[in-house]
Image: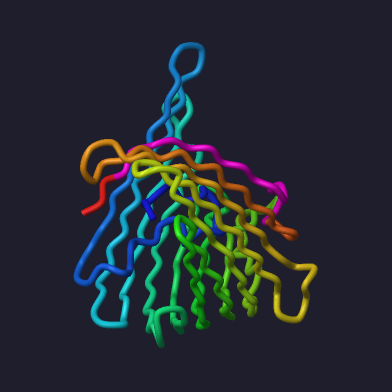
Amino acid sequence: MALVSLPACAIVNIEDLQLDDSVQGVGGSLSLNFSGKSGNTDNLQESVNLGLQYVHGGHVELMLASYDYSASNGVGNDENKFLHLRHTDWIDSNRAWELYTQYERSPYIANKKRFIVGAGGRWKRQAQAFKGVFAASIFYEDEQADEVEPNGVKEYEKSKIYRFNWMLEGSYDLSKQAKMGFSVYFQPKVNEWENNRTIANWNLTNQLIGNLATTMTINYKHDSKPYLNLKEDDWQYEMGVNYKF
């Protein structure tokens, strides 16, 4: 699947960044997304996403990294940094277990930091032009932010908790050049299901020349207990170009 943009939030959709793990050896994917506006207001949004993986036998080592930045009238207003590492062992052609860790930081949103480490399994199915993956895991999550108070800035620890993670992903080949994909995540706190997060994604990839493609992505995020005064729901729409190597 092509490398596409990350949602500009602390909850990041991983599956849309996956590379083809059926190809042995080292592979990668680079995605660039830009948007801007000039005139009465000057706005700039840009993101760079990189995916690298090493497939050897039934083992897959995966690294995903992303940097997102936006500014208005020359003043930065959002920045997101993301790194994900994963080791996957395929038991057979349809079943695997995996270990993963992830770090994220959003300096402009209360200097949010998020670290997770988890383990679980995944199962995949394929029927002609359709490919599907289901994954289930549990992870430890450590989130922190700086909470502004009347008398200064105070370090605010939001959570050190465990969450379940269930994921359903699918992709469908519309033609030899075009592919449509989706993924849905549900991440409830282990002992408090009212504290949950949901991520949904839809993307369309159109192959241009060789390994160069255009991408269009719609991301939706719901956090039942968001930071400070942030909204529970968040949408993001992006278009960009992708190169696989």
Q: Residue at x 60, y 56 (%)?
A: 153
> Relative to 158, is 53 on the left or the right?
left
Residue 88 occupies quadrant: bottom left
Q: Is residue 217 above or below residue 53?
A: above
Extreme residue in the front direction: 128
Image quadrant containing the C terminus: bottom left
Q: In the rendered structure, does residue 238 fall within the stretch colored magenta?
A: yes
103 or 181: nearer the viewer: 181
Image quadrant containing the N terminus: bottom left
Image position, residue 173 (x, y; %) = 44, 49
Q: Residue at x 40, y 40 (%)?
A: 215
172 or 206: nearer the viewer: 172
Residue 168 occupies quadrant: bottom right
Extreme residue in the top direction: 39
Q: Residue at x 58, y 53 (%)?
A: 110
> Relative to 23, is 224 on the left or the right?
right
Q: Which residues are magenta?
A: 227-242
Applied colour scheme: rainbow
Image position, residue 195 (x, y; %) = 75, 68
Q: Residue at x 53, y 59 (%)?
A: 170
Q: In the rendered structure, does residue 21 fall within the stretch colored magenta?
A: no
Residue 75 occupies quadrant: top left
Magenta-drawn stretch, dominant element (helix, strand or loop)? strand
Image position, residue 14 (x, y; %) = 47, 61
